[in-house]
Structures are given as C-alpha cells and as structure tokens.
Image (cartoon, rainbow, N blue to C red):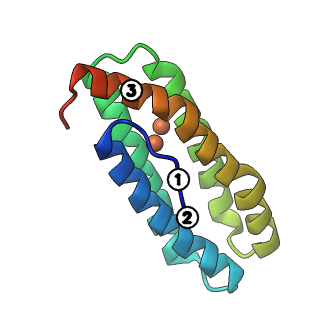
Amino acid sequence: MELSQVSFEPMNEVHNKEAEVLERLLIAIKNRENLDNVYDEFVKDVENHFSFEQKLMEKYEFFAKIPHKMEHNKILNELEKIKNHLNEYENLEKYFDTTFLPWLNNHIATMDTVTAGFFSQIGAKI
Ligand SMILES: [Fe+2]
Ligand SMILES: [Fe+2]
C-alpha cells in the first residue's frame, strides 16, 4: 500500500511500518481469519505511530499539537470500539474501506504533512 510521503523521514518510516501491518490485517479480514492477534498488533502499531508524533510535537512545541492529537484520539476510539466486533467481517471491510483508509490518507496529506514540514524546518531530532 502506497502512503504519501512527508518531508520528515522518521515519520515516513513509521508510516511505512504501519502500511505493512495494515496490509496484513486487511488480508486477514478478507480471508475471514481469526483476527484477535493481528488486530491487537495493528492497534499497538497505530498507538506507537501516534505517540511517536505526539512526543515530538510536545518536545518541539508544535503550534497545532492539540488538533493533531485530537484527530489521533478520534480514530483510536473507533478502533477500540471495533475490538468487540472482530467477527463482523463485512462491517470491518466496510469500515476500513470507507472510513479508516480515507482517514489515514487524508491525515497524512494534511495534518502530518504540515507537522513534518515543521519538524524538518527546525531540524528536529528523534
Ligand atoms: Fe502519521
Ligand atoms: Fe498524525
């Protein structure tokens, strides 16, 4: 899966890892596999992805850190709720196709792109 690139390389690395884990999850959903483990791994990866960005935003006092964190929290809440419905494969497919993937692409193209531009401009170090 191709996610758009941002101007701060450490964020691209985190996004590429997430694309890999997400692909595994989507295949497992498609194949109607037991999702308990792969879904847990996916949520942990999303949490790592978001906390990586949030720690840097705090460290460098990024001006939009609060709205950026709010976007993360909104989607994390949805992912938590879905945990109790992992056997509803059709709903899961629909959620990832129509909500999560468009959200992720849009988030990277907007909020993450601006945040990455800030990090690279100030020479942020991880
Ligand atoms: Fe991100
Ligand atoms: Fe983000």
Tell me: 99 left or right of 41.
right
Give whichever of discs 3 and 2 has the lower sequence position: 2
Label 2 crowd (10 A; few <14 / some 14-19 / many >=20): few
Left or right of residue 8: residue 79: right
Instruction: Give the residue number, with chain letter if any, for mark 1.
Output: 3
* Mark closest to the chain's N terminus, 1 or 3: 1
Determine the secondary structure under disc 3. Answer: helix
Residue lying at 69% horizontally and 48% vertically, measured from the top left: 102
Circle 2 — which element? loop
Between 119 and 50, the one nearer to me in the picture: 119
Closer-to-camera residue (73/6): 6
| Direction top: furthest residue | 63
Q: Position of residue 74 (x, y in %)?
A: 61, 37
Residue carrying label 3: 117
Residue displayed at 21% across by 25% down: 123
Which quarter of the figure has residue 16?
bottom left
Instruction: Give the residue type at disc 1.
Output: Leu
**Where does label 2 land, which residue?**
1
Residue 118 place in picture, x, y as percent: 35, 22
- Residue farthest to the left? 125
Answer yes or no: disc 2 within 8 Å of ligand 1.
no
Q: Are marks 1 and 2 in contact (CB under 8 Å)?
A: yes
Q: Residue at x 67, y 77 (%)?
A: 29
Label 3 to label 2: alpha-carbon separation = 23 Å
Q: Quadrant of residue 53?
A: top left
Residue 70 is left or right of residue 101, and the answer is left
Q: Is residue 84 visible?
A: yes
Report the side of 80 relative to 50 (left or right).
right
Label 1: state its secondary structure.
loop
